[in-house]
């Protein structure tokens, strides 16, 4: 169990740095785009495309990060009223459904769309779209890993207490 938590902590730290770098990169590219468009009167199509794809990568990696922290949005009005074994079963079922969604839609579907778009080239960057879509299965794998760790955590959580589960 300790190895799972250490692995999650390492992944979370790497993801945190990567998301921060992507955000800094977006800020720099956005600033460059503003300068070239409004001050130099020469809009940059490359920067616009880079900004769009970087935002997509950051959003998908951030969603995996949020699942790793178990801070994802959920409607807790019903689950928070349940205690004991039924609550544990519900929390584990939620993690298993998340795992299934990530496996089928993000990993399987993401790999399919990545393969399909490897022949399509982006307009400004001139790279295969498959490289852009590659983030979908990567994020899916991360969400799957975090779902497994979260499910194991729920197995060892006592839901008889009155405090909110974090």
Image: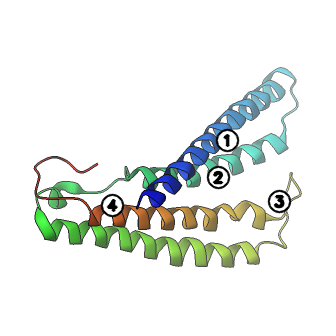
Query: Residue at coordinates 42% horizontally, 63% vertically from top-left?
Result: 149
Which residue lies most toward the top here? 39
Asked if the residue at tag 4 contacts the one at tag 2, i.e. Cβ–Cβ closer than 8 Å, the answer is no
Q: Say above or below: 37 vs 79.
A: above
User: Within the image, what quadrant is residue 48 found in?
Assistant: top right
Can you see residue 63?
A: no
- Badge 4 marks a residue whose secondary structure is helix
Asked if the residue at tag 1 contacts the one at tag 2, i.e. Cβ–Cβ closer than 8 Å, the answer is yes
Q: Say above or below: 34 vs 88.
A: above
C-alpha distance separating marks 4 and 1: 30 Å
Q: Residue tagged by mark 3?
A: 122
Q: Residue tagged by mark 2?
A: 57
Asked if the residue at tag 1 contacts the one at tag 4, i.e. Cβ–Cβ closer than 8 Å, the answer is no
How far across and how far down the image is residue 151, in percent? 35, 66
C-alpha distance separating marks 4 and 3: 42 Å
C-alpha distance separating marks 1 and 3: 20 Å
- Badge 3 marks a residue whose secondary structure is loop
How far across and how far down the image is residue 136, in percent? 62, 64
- Badge 1 marks a residue whose secondary structure is helix
Q: Residue tagged by mark 1?
A: 22
Query: Residue at coordinates 21% horizontally, 67% vertically from top-left?
Result: 88
Say which mark, if any, is on residue 153: 4
Which mark is in front, 2 or 4? 4
Q: Residues within 10 Å of mark 2 (few under 14, many from 20)?
A: many
Say which mark, if any, is on residue 141: none
């Amino acid at each position: 169990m300790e190895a799972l938590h250490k692995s999650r902590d390492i992944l979370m730290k790497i993801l945190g740095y990567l998301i921060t770098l992507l955000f800094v990169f977006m800020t720099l590219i956005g600033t460059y785009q503003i300068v070239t468009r409004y001050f130099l009167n020469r809009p940059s199509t490359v920067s616009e495309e880079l900004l769009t794809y970087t935002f997509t990568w950051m959003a998908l990696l951030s969603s995996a990060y949020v699942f790793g922290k178990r801070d994802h949005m959920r409607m807790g009005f019903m689950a928070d009223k349940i205690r004991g074994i039924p609550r544990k079963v519900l929390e584990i079922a939620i993690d298993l459904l998340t795992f299934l969604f990530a496996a089928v839609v993000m990993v399987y579907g993401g790999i399919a769309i990545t393969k399909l778009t490897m022949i399509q080239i982006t307009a400004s960057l001139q790279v295969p779209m498959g490289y852009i879509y590659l983030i979908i299965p990567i994020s899916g794998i991360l969400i799957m890993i975090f779902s497994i760790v979260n499910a194991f955590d729920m197995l060892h959580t006592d839901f008889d207490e009155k405090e909110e589960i974090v």
